[in-house]
C-alpha cells in the first residue's frame, strides 16, 4: 500500500516537475513579448523623430537604448553590440526578429531592409508603420470589448456541466 502511494507521489512529482517550469517559462515569454509589442509603436516614433532631427539610424537606435525601458532597450542594445562587433546591420536586425518573434517587429525590419536597398524617406515609412500598429491594437481592443459578453457566456455554459 505504501509503495502505491509513493509511486503515485513520484508520478505526480515528475509530472509537476516537467510541466511547471514549461508553464512558468511560457508565461514569462508571453509577458515579455506583450511588453515588447506595447512599447514598439512609441519606439518606432522615437526612431522616426531622431531621423528627422538629423541622426543616423544607428544613432537613433542608440537613443532608443538610452531612453527606453526593457525589453525594448535590451533588444536594441544587442543590435548595437552586434553591429559594433562587425555584423552587418541588416543581419543584426534579422537576429533581433528571430529572437523576439514579433510580427510588428518583423514588419519594421522588413521595411527598413527594403528602404536600405531601394531608398526613400525612412522617417515617413516608420511613421506609417507605427500608425498601422496602433490602429491594429486599437481594433483588437474594440473586438475584445465587443465580444466580452459572448466569451463570458461561453465560459459559463462550458463549466455548467462540471458545476452541476
Image (tube, grey):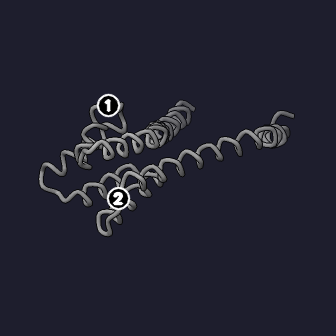
Residue displayed at 21% across by 45% down? 80
Question: 153 or 21: which is nearer to us?
Answer: 153
The quarter of the rendered structure image containing the C terminus is: top right
Helix, strand, or loop for circle 1?
helix
Q: Position of residue 84 (x, y in %)?
A: 14, 48
- CB under 8 Å between callouts 2 and 1? no
For disc 2, the neighbor class at 10 Å (few under 14, some 14 to 19, many from 20) is: some
Q: Earlier in the sequence, mark 2 or mark 1?
A: 1
| Residue in the foreground of this view, choosing between 9 and 57 | 57
Q: Position of residue 123 (x, y in %)?
A: 38, 51
Residue 80 horizontal side relative to residue 41, left or right: left
Q: Residue furthest right?
A: 164
Residue 147 in the image: state x and y as whole percent: 77, 43
Residue to which mark 2 is pinned: 112
Asked which secondary structure carries label 2, the reply is: helix
Q: Residues within 10 Å of mark 1 (few under 14, many from 20)?
A: few
As measured in the structure, the alpha-carbon distance from the residue carrying label 2 to the one carrying label 1 is: 21 Å
Label 1 sits on residue: 67
Give me the disc on residue 45: none
Give the side of residue 162 with respect to residue 16, left or right: right
Write the residue at 41% across / 55% down.
108
Question: Residue at horizontal 23%, vertical 43%?
Answer: 59
The reply, left or right, for residue 33 in relation to residue 79 is right
> Which residue shows up at 52% across the image and 48% down it?
131
Q: Please, which residue is most extreme toward the bottom here?
A: 118
State the residue in front, 111 or 142: 111
Please indicate, yes or no, whether residue 17 appears anywhere in the rendered image. Answer: no
Q: Is residue 63 above or below residue 79?
A: above
Amino acid at each position: 500500500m505504501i509503495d502505491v502511494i509513493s509511486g503515485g507521489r513520484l508520478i505526480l512529482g515528475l509530472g509537476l516537475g516537467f510541466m511547471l517550469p514549461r508553464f512558468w517559462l511560457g508565461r514569462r515569454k508571453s509577458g515579455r513579448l506583450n511588453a515588447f509589442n506595447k512599447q514598439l509603436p512609441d519606439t518606432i516614433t522615437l526612431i522616426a523623430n531622431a531621423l528627422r532631427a538629423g541622426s543616423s539610424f544607428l544613432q537613433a537606435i542608440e537613443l532608443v537604448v538610452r531612453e527606453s525601458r526593457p525589453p525594448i532597450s535590451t533588444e536594441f542594445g544587442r543590435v548595437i553590440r552586434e553591429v559594433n562587433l562587425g555584423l552587418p546591420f541588416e543581419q543584426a536586425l534579422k537576429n533581433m526578429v528571430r529572437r523576439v518573434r514579433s510580427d510588428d517587429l518583423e514588419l519594421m525590419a522588413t521595411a527598413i531592409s527594403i528602404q536600405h536597398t531601394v531608398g526613400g524617406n525612412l522617417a515617413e515609412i516608420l511613421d506609417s508603420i507605427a500608425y498601422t500598429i496602433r490602429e491594429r491594437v486599437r481594433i483588437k481592443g474594440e473586438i475584445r470589448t465587443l465580444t466580452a459578453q459572448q466569451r463570458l457566456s461561453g465560459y459559463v455554459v462550458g463549466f455548467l456541466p462540471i458545476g452541476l
